[in-house]
């Protein structure tokens, strides 16, 4: 992994860390951040060229994947993310933490749907020729990597995908 690819990961993590850096954060949101960052310590990264990645089969179409641009989708994003943890307590803390997200064009949130049900969520950011697809969450009906592929295809079709994809798994 090169310096730009490491930097894109650091930028995203710094943004996530700052979510609850407010005057009076709730105890639950601080605990949620701590829980979230413990999982990030286990993250693995793949660096992939865009072409082979976007040429594989689709499970979701572009119209099934939405850029989060209002609060209800933020909540759906948070709930899907929380399913990455096994205990109800951790899930509740993650929802509390991620519900604090203030949308930022540098860090786009996406939620995918199948038959009206939310099935995938991820964060996308770009930096110096790299697209980071991170914090991938999916329901039991959709593989995480498949959601990342479908999201990359949507980004490609919208001319928002860089030449190199950094995939956080």
Image (cartoon, rainbow, N blue to C red):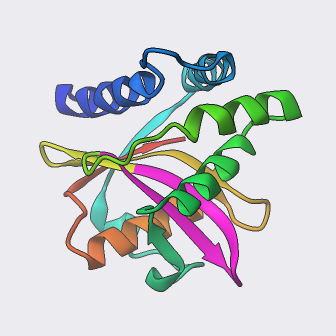
Instruction: Give left or right: position of 17 versus 80.
Output: left
Q: Residue at x 57, y 38 (%)?
A: 98
Q: Main secondary structure of the magenta part?
A: strand
User: Is the residue 36 above or below the residue 124 in the image?
Assistant: above
Q: Residue at x 61, y 26 (%)?
A: 36
Residue 120 in the magenta stretch? The answer is yes
Quarter of the image holding residue 143? bottom right
Q: Residue at x 78, y 28 (%)?
A: 90
The answer to whether one can see residue 87 in this image is: no
Residue 3 in the magenta stretch? The answer is no
Instruction: Provide residue 110's location: percent of width, then percent of height.
Output: 47, 60
User: Is the residue 108 above or below the residue 46 in the image?
Assistant: below
Q: Residue at x 66, y 34 (%)?
A: 96
Number of numbered discs overlaid on the protein picture = 0
Q: Nearer the viewer, residue 49 or 118?
A: 118
Instruction: Give left or right: position of 9 versus 84.
Output: left
Q: Nearer the viewer, residue 103 or 133?
A: 103
Quarter of the image holding residue 84? top right
Q: Nearer the viewer, residue 13 or 23?
A: 23
Q: Nearer the viewer, residue 34 or 145?
A: 34
The answer to whether one can see residue 123 in this image is: yes
Instruction: Provide residue 108's location: percent of width, then percent of height.
Output: 36, 53
Quadrant where the C terminus lies? top right
Instruction: Provide residue 133's location: percent of width, then percent of height.
Output: 41, 49
Quadrant where the N terminus lies? top left
Which stretch did the figure color magenta? Answer: 107-123
User: Is the residue 115 above or below the residue 158 in the image?
Assistant: below
Instruction: Provide residue 34's location: percent of width, then percent of height.
Output: 61, 16
Q: Residue furthest front?
A: 24
């Amino acid at each position: 992994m090169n310096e730009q690819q490491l930097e894109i990961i650091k930028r995203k993590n710094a943004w996530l860390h700052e979510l609850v850096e407010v005057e009076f954060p709730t105890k639950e949101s601080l605990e949620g951040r701590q829980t979230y960052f413990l999982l990030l310590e286990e993250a693995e990264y793949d660096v992939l060229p865009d072409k082979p990645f976007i040429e594989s089969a689709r499970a979701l179409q572009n119209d099934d994947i939405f850029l989060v641009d209002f609060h209800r989708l933020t909540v759906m994003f948070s709930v899907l993310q929380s399913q990455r943890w096994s205990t109800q307590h951790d899930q509740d803390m993650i929802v509390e933490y991620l519900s604090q997200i203030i949308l930022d064009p540098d860090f786009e949130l996406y939620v995918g749907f199948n038959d009206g049900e939310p099935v995938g969520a991820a964060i996308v950011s770009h930096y110096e020729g790299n697209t980071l697809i991170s914090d991938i969450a999916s329901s039991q009906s959709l593989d995480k990597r498949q959601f990342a592929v479908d999201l990359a295809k949507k980004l490609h079709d919208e001319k928002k995908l860089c030449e190199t994809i950094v995939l956080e798994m």
